[in-house]
Amino acid sequence: MRQDSRPEPPGAVSVWLLAARPKTLWASVAPVVVGTAMAFGDGGFHAPAALTALACSVLIQVATNFANDLFDFEKGADTEARQGPLRVTQAGLVTPGMMKRGVVVVLLLTLLGGVYLIWRGGWPAVFIGVLSVTAGILYTGGPRPLGYLGLGDLLVLVFFGPVAVAGTYYVQALTVNATVVVAGLAPGLLSVAILAVNNLRDADEDRRTGKRTLAVRFGPGFARGEYIAAVVAACLLPLPLYLASGRHPYSVATVAVVAVALPAFRRLFVAEGPSLNSVLAYTARLLLLYSAVFSIGWVL
């Protein structure tokens, strides 16, 4: 008797984990780690606020990933020719209606934590939360999705960088300063590097489906240059912060992360299509490494 060799579809939990894109969630963890370390260094650490900010940050990214899965499918940007990880709505594992409900459920969970942060931080916490959720939805949703216009890199820089770092710092210390905002650019830049690899990998498909990312607008050379510039700038950023203040000298150890990034730089120029997924994963680990080195250096 001939056996059916087709793989079994993943279970319900696995499907939703795929949609959440767990390997990308370091982008929401890293700025919270950095903001918490800076609050600790300034004597403003508040554990309940830090943990709640972490949960809300991750949940907002999960909701954004769900919305991206849904809206890219509805706009035809995700096709069978996709070279990146599986998108569950396009693959038929989740219906559009189920994905919409998934977005709502995750946002409601975010609101639960948000109530505490609003109680602690007041109207600034409301503003940060609403703005972050709105940006996540408008990234691929709405009549003119920002990601389709080539504005995704700017959104990622701002919201995975200064907004997340300064927001985390604020709900703990209940104040914020320019140093925190500037330091927040580094995790934002490394998240931009992740997006640059993603857009480089998907450039051909995005071009066919009308998604005008920077890699589509300016070509693969620009995307590679953007990646290297973002990583190097992020790693060097603590140096001018130290020179300006004379404080937290050990945070400058992030300069060494550039050496760790060299294999990704080399791979970026030889890999194409799905082979770039390894660079994507490596860059996520670089983001984690950067946040750990900076945070430890800042509190020493």
Image: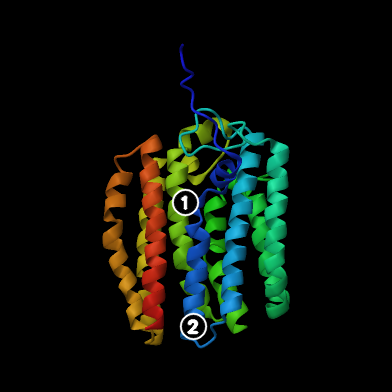
| Camera-nearest residue between 95 and 14 | 14
At 52% from the left edge and 36% from the top edge, which residue is drawn? Answer: 206
Q: Earlier in the sequence, mark 2 or mark 1?
A: 1
Q: Amino acid at mark 1?
A: Lys
In screen coordinates, is 244 left or right of 68?
Answer: left
| Colouring convention used in this rendered image of the protein | rainbow
Location of residue 283 with respect to 167 vertically, above or below: above
Q: Which residue is mark 1?
A: 23
- Residue at 56 percent across and 67 percent down: it is 54
Q: Position of residue 256 (x, y in %)?
A: 28, 67
Query: Is residue 269 something that shows in the picture?
Result: yes
Which residue position holds label 2? 40
| Amino acid type shown at disc 2 | Phe
Residue 268 is left or right of residue 130, and the answer is left
Please tell me in which quadrant of the rendered image residue 211 appears.
top right
Query: Which quadrant holds the C terminus?
Result: bottom left
Q: Secondary structure at mark 1?
A: helix
Q: Is residue 233 above or below residue 221?
A: below
